[in-house]
């Protein structure tokens, strides 16, 4: 076995390690010197600050307010126009009605006249009353023969109602109608109808064109 060569091998390994470390340090030193000597691109290549740049920058930053964008103080209002001299009339805007000459106000006079109740030359026209185009009857039965119709009329007369019997042909046969009226207003016919119904009669409100 080669046990005698182990110390020599270990010594050679340590020497090799030390030599590699020294070579690495030398290379790093050379690179550092090279970097410090070579100008940095975009910084030292033809770009030099003027000698008074610091004074200009200090003057610019003296009045700088970092809170200016956050300020909520209102801006100074615009100067108001000077008031017009007394007695001068302002020009009329387009579309503004001009006041009447002589200081007269027809609208104000009309309002005063209506408030005081005086007609002031304004004639009021009354609408003519509406005319009902119909006349009305209260019919108290329709019968096939005249005797039954006359008996119905007699019963109404005994209660104070003045009725009349009229004959009309319907479906080829004569019909005898017992009616009260005529009434010029519908309200009068309705009142009479309620009175007759109160006596136990069946009625019908009939309207006829004038």
Image (tube, grey):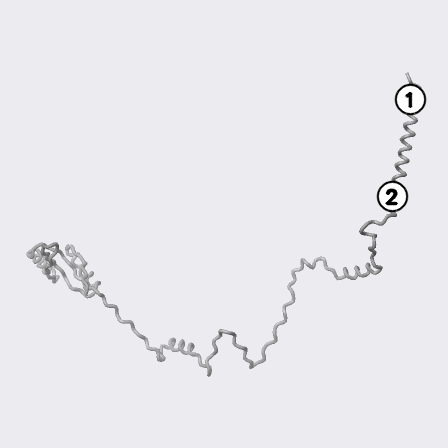
Q: Is residue 160 left or right of residue 109?
A: left
Residue at image point 64% right, 63% down: 74
Vertical order, 95 against 171 (above or below): below
Which of these two is toward me, 117 or 103?
Answer: 103
For label 2, the SS is: helix
Dot placed on the residue nearer the N-terminal end, 2 or 1: 1
Count of marks placed on residues: 2
Task: Tell me the crowding category of disc 1: few under 14, some 14 to 19, or many 20 or more residues within 10 angstroms, Cα based.
Answer: few
Which quadrant of the structure image shows residue 10?
A: top right
Q: Which mark is residue 32?
A: 2
For label 1, the SS is: helix
Residue 70 image offset from top left, x and y in percent: 67, 58
In the displayed image of the protein, which residue is found farthest to the top?
1
Vertical order, 124 against 205 (above or below): below
- For the N terminus, the quadrant is top right
Which quadrant of the structure image shows residue 66?
A: bottom right
Residue at image point 80% right, 51% down: 42
Residue at image point 7% right, 55% down: 145
Residue at image point 9% right, 54% down: 144
Q: Which mark is residue 6?
A: 1
- Distance (Cα) linking label 2 and label 1: 39 Å
Residue 164 image offset from top left, x and y in percent: 11, 62
Q: Is residue 118 left or right of residue 142?
A: right
Residue 86 image offset from top left, x and y in percent: 57, 80
Which quadrant of the structure image shows residue 205?
A: bottom left
């Amino acid at each position: 076995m080669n046990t005698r060569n182990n110390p020599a091998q270990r010594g050679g390994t340590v020497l090799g390690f030390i030599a590699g470390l020294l070579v690495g340090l030398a290379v790093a030193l050379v690179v550092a010197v090279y970097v410090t000597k070579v100008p940095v691109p975009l910084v030292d290549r033809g770009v030099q600050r003027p000698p008074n740049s610091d004074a200009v920058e200090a003057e610019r930053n003296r009045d700088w307010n970092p809170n200016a964008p956050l300020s909520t103080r209102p801006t100074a209002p615009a100067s108001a126009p000077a008031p017009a001299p007394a007695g001068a009339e302002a020009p009329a805007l387009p579309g503004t009605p001009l006041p009447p000459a002589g200081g007269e106000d027809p609208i104000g006079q009309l309002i005063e006249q209506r408030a005081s109740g005086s007609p002031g030359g304004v004639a009021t026209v009354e609408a003519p009353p509406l005319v009902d185009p119909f006349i009305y009857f209260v019919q108290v039965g329709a019968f096939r023969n005249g005797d039954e119709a006359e008996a119905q009329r007699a019963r109404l007369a005994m209660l104070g109602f003045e009725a009349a019997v009229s004959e009309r042909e319907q479906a080829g046969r004569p019909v005898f109608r017992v009616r009260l009226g005529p009434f010029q207003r519908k309200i009068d016919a309705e009142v009479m109808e309620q009175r007759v119904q109160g006596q136990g009669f069946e009625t019908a409100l009939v309207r006829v064109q004038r």
